[in-house]
């Protein structure tokens, strides 16, 4: 009688432990699900704080060196200049996208005839070589998930997503300081190749309560392949609207084009 009672107690304990594990996992899932809305809100608030900025940058990869400058002013005005090894410019004044080609003495004007989301993605891709993670807000796909973790710089959030690159899956993970949303690293895994972008040094602003990258390194499968050092970083810079439009110099030709959706008439 005593043994039977003992077996029933063990069964009850096993059932209780199983129920506890299920509840714990369910609670964890709910907490992780609750993180993403808070992450999006934090990133939106951070983006509002960075209403304007500018910086210069020197990127090295092997023996190659490139120098460029970038400026941003909300809402969505951008100007990127590559100064070395060649020179060209992209600028967007909120309506028109400008491309200057000094070697060809040509100025190209593009009118974006795209839905808002696609126009944003197009501009994001166009100016990607100039601006870094940590200044711009990452474009998060609908399948992105987030969880709170501990990082080398204290509390953080890890954002994971899967992207499709011409039929191949690419796993992407962002690591951001929490709750500021400051960029720490981005890791991409495609097949057997892992790429990492990591902030080694940052510049912080106590008034804005955020930090931006000052030195960024890039690794492929753990091997250092390049680095970028930023200087003349000015947050909340006073940037006139004229800084975001380009004019043709004497002797230049000007062309106007429209950017439309693929398949559009």
Image (spheres, rainbow, N blue to C red):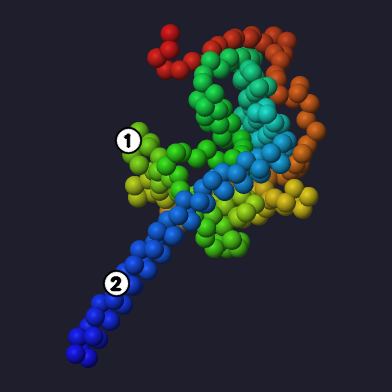
Q: Residues within 10 Å of mark 2 (few under 14, many from 20)?
A: few
Give coordinates of residue 73: x percent, y percent: 71, 31
What residue lies at 55% left-to-right and 11% top-to-bottom? 257
SS at badge 1: loop
What residue lies at 76% left-to-right and 23% top-to-bottom? 241
Residue lying furthest front in this view?
Answer: 1
Residue beneath disc 2: 15
Taking 36 as reference, is 101 left or right?
right
What residue lies at 56% left-to-right and 31% top-to-bottom? 124
SS at badge 2: helix
Give coordinates of residue 65: x percent, y percent: 60, 41
Q: Report whether residue 23 is seen.
A: yes
Toward the viewer: 229 or 92? 92
Q: Report whether residue 81 is seen.
A: no
Rendered-image quadrant of the N terminus:
bottom left
Q: Distance from label 2 to label 1 (Cα)?
A: 44 Å
Rendered-image quadrant of the C terminus:
top left
Q: Is residue 72 above or below residue 96?
A: below
Give coordinates of residue 127: x percent, y percent: 59, 31
Residue beneath disc 1: 167
Toward the viewer: 4 or 221? 4
């Amino acid at each position: 009688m005593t043994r039977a009672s003992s077996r029933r107690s063990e069964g009850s304990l096993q059932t209780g432990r199983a129920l506890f594990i299920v509840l714990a996992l369910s609670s964890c899932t709910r907490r992780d699900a609750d993180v993403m809305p808070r992450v999006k809100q934090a990133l939106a608030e951070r983006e509002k704080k960075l209403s304007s900025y500018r910086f210069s940058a020197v990127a090295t990869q092997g023996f190659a060196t490139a120098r460029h400058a970038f400026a941003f002013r909300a809402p969505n005005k951008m100007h990127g200049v590559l100064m070395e090894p060649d020179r060209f410019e992209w600028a967007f004044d909120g309506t028109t996208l400008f491309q200057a080609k000094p070697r060809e003495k040509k100025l190209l004007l593009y009118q974006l005839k795209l839905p808002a989301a696609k126009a944003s993605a197009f501009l994001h891709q166009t100016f990607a070589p100039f601006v870094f993670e940590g200044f711009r807000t990452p474009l998060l796909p609908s399948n992105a998930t987030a969880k709170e973790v501990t990082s080398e710089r204290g509390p953080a959030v890890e954002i994971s997503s899967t992207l499709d690159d011409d039929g191949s899956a690419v796993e992407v993970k962002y690591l951001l300081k929490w709750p500021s949303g400051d960029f720490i690293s981005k890791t991409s895994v495609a097949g057997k190749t892992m790429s990492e972008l990591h902030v080694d040094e940052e510049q912080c602003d106590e008034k804005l309560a955020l930090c931006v990258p000052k030195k960024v390194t890039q690794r492929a499968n753990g091997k250092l392949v390049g680095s970028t050092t930023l200087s003349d970083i000015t947050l909340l810079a006073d940037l006139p609207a004229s800084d975001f439009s380009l004019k043709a110099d004497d002797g230049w030709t000007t062309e106007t084009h429209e950017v439309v959706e693929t398949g559009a008439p």
